[in-house]
Image: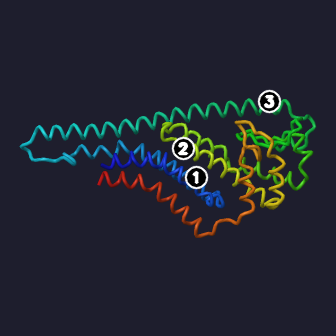
Amino acid sequence: MFALLLTALAVVLSGVAPRVMARLVSFRRAPRAALVAWQAVSLAAVLAALCAAPAAVPYLDGPGWFACTDDCAGALGWVRTRQWVVVGIAGAVTLAVLARLLLSGHRIGTRLRAARTRHRDLVDVLAAPGSAGQEDGIRVLDHATPTAYCLPGRRSRVVLTEGALAALPADELDAVLAHERAHLRGRHDLLLEYFTVLHHSVPEPVRSPEALREVRLLVEALADRAAVRTSGPVVTARALLTLAQGQAPEAGLGAGGDGTTAARMRLLAEDPLPAPTVAVMYVYAVAVVALPLALLWLAWR
């Protein structure tokens, strides 16, 4: 019983819940709490799938839902067969999720790290020899399109183009640098990698692209908060508009050019969510992670 509930919960949390949460656009006004809630839902979906097989094991101890007297041995054998079917399905779900999770993590992690290493080496070769701030990990490329992005990792880089330096006044440039450094300091790349791995490990029929898009927007909104603390909302919005045509590589995180500029500019003009609403979001995150663990505990009572 609980194994089936956990399997259904995994499907709901991986396919239905993200689509509902993506429609709650007001939660973007608290990007940190929203990211915690998204992480909780994705983690709970994985936990529910992984707990399905352990929750089915106690089901073998008794005749289960179809109990009968000792006189009906044939019926009892049929019941035992049904019990093993439930356990088999739960075990298959658990093993499939675990295998897809490990395979997805290996493929995506290897690909992203290799791409970042190649791009970092290329940026170091192509960067202007006299560009200021190279000791701080800043590299300037000779390109006319205003573009800014960062390459996370142990040898992180903040990459700017000559077009960005020409188009951005000093205060807007400070906002852009604060944005990119917030990505590096917060290791937002690991957060996005985590969600990308989970996204590709979920079977396609229940996969929710809305979740990945929303998380990417929230990560950028969180970095925008750091830019606002440095330069204010108006200056930050102007910088985002200037960089809207730039494109960051797949291995990087960029301040603009990712299709979220308009939504992020609207967020800059809105007030943050009230503290009680933010508190409810954190409570929701804790509750959704606790749910599959509670079902597993009930199965073993």
CB atoms of marks 1 and 2 within 8 Å: yes
The alpha-carbon separation of the residues under discs 1 and 2 comes to 10 Å
Extreme residue toward the left, this view: 71
Amino acid type, residue under disc 2 in the picture: Ser
Residue 95 position within the rendered picture, expressed as x and y whole percent measured from the top left: 41, 35
Lower position in the chain sequence, tag 1 or tag 2: 1
Task: Residue at 46% x, 33% y: name it.
Answer: 99
Which of 147/110 is in front? 147
Left or right of residue 81, residue 186 in this image: right
Instruction: Point out residue 73 in the picture as x, y percentages from the top left corner.
Output: 10, 39
Quadrant of the image for the C terminus?
bottom left
Query: Is the residue marked by circle 2 packed among few (<14), some (14-19), or many (20+) residues within 10 Å?
Result: many
The residue labelled by disc 1 is 22
- The label nearer to you, 1 versus 3, is 1
Q: Is mark 1 on a helix, strand or loop?
A: helix
In which image quadrant can residue 90 be found?
top left
Badge number at residue 208:
2
Q: How crowded is mark 3: few (under 14 residues within 10 Å), some or many (20 or more)?
A: few
- Above or below, 69 against 118 in this view is below
Q: Earlier in the sequence, mark 1 or mark 3?
A: 1
Q: What residue type is labelled 3?
A: Leu
Task: Indicate which label's residue lies in the foreground, 3 or 2.
Answer: 2
Image disc number at residue 113:
none
What residue does disc 3 label? Answer: 122
Give the Cα separation between the discs numbered 3 and 2. Answer: 34 Å
